[in-house]
Amino acid sequence: MMTTTLPEITQAARVFHALSDETRLEIVRLLSHGERCVCELQQVLEAAQSRLSFHLKTLKDAGLVSDRRDGRWVYYALNRDALAGSCAQACCSI
């Protein structure tokens, strides 16, 4: 029988929460094609910057995306290893 520690359950909950929203799933889909700046995501999603920031923070807190600053622009990228590992671990720990 597999036992699960509390931190694993907490991380699984973060991942499931991050992927439970249609906007965040769309962000993941867009980032699966490569790194995007916030302005590109804003334009494609037709989302206000504050709303987009909220969704990106949720994905970042779950470890599913990373960001980097280049001058005044912030670029986001999908953390494919974390996505695959988190989803596999989350499903196996239930």
Image (tube, grey):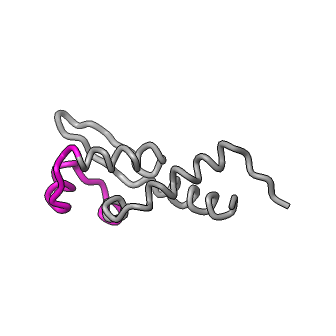
- Count of number-bearing discs: 0
Q: Residue at x 27, y 44 (%)?
A: 53
Quarter that holds the C terminus: bottom right
Query: In this rendering, would 57 be left or right of 82?
Result: left
Residue 67, quarter of the rendered image: top left
**Chain part drawn in magenta:** 28-50
Quarter that holds the N terminus: bottom right
Query: In this rendering, would 27 be left or right of 18?
Result: left
Query: In this rendering, would 54 be left or right of 63?
Result: left
Name the spot of residue 85 as percent of width and height, x first: 58, 57
Residue at the outermost right position = 1
Tell me if residue 71 comes above or below residue 37 in the rendering. Answer: above
Name the spot of residue 43 as percent of width and height, x first: 14, 58
Q: Residue at x 39, y 55 (%)?
A: 78
Name the spot of residue 91 as percent of width and height, x first: 63, 64
Residue at the outermost top position = 71
Q: Residue at x 59, y 53 (%)?
A: 12
Residue 46, quarter of the rendered image: bottom left
Q: Residue at x 57, y 56 (%)?
A: 86
Name the spot of residue 47 as percent of width and height, x first: 18, 55
Q: Does the segment drawn in magenta span residue 91?
A: no
Dominant secondary structure of the residues highlighted in magenta in the image? helix
Residue closer to the observer: 3 or 75 = 3
Query: In this rendering, would 22 be left or right of 71?
Result: right
Q: Does the segment drawn in magenta span residue 47?
A: yes
